Amino acid sequence: MPALVSLPSDNLSFAWDRTESAETLRAKLDDLTSPTWVRTAAWLMREAQIREVWQFLTLEQIDTQFKNLRPLLGKRQQLWDYLLHTARELGKL
């Protein structure tokens, strides 16, 4: 039986499958031109609670990249469609 891997105490609660702190995640999301930005942002949007997403991404960033993010959102795709639609209706975008 494999040994259990202990995650660091500063690991994000939704990062159950990887070592990821708020600091390392922010560093990955700081560069919008990075080839891994879309995958990292989509992972965050799938795994984190909505209120946690806003700690790392803005509504404008999500809207700008949504065409690339949408196919990677899995079951959360409809939720994000609804949130962006609602943001537009409310004049937030």
Image (tube, rainbow, N blue to C red):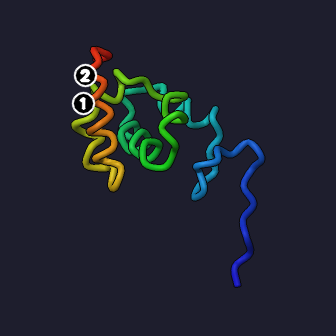
In the rendered image, the residue lying farthest to the bottom is 1
Q: Amino acid at mark 2?
A: Arg
x and y percent of residue 38 in the render?
36, 39
Give residue 88's mark. Answer: 2
19, above or below 36, in the image: below
**Pointer 1 and pointer 2: residues touching (CB < 8 Å)?**
yes
Q: Looking at this view, is 19 or 75 the one in front?
A: 75
**What residue is shown at x 34% (from left), y 55% (from top)?**
75
x and y percent of residue 29 in the render?
47, 31
SS category of the residue bearing label 1 = helix
**What residue is shown at x 40% (from left), y 36% (from top)?**
37
Q: Amino acid at mark 1?
A: His
On-image quarter of the C terminus:
top left
Residue under pointer 1: 85
x and y percent of residue 60 in the render?
34, 21
25, above or below 71, in the image: above
Q: Looking at this view, is 49 or 35 the one in front?
A: 49
84, above or below 47, in the image: above
Crowding at label 1, few (<14), some or many (≥20) Cα neighbours within 10 Å? some
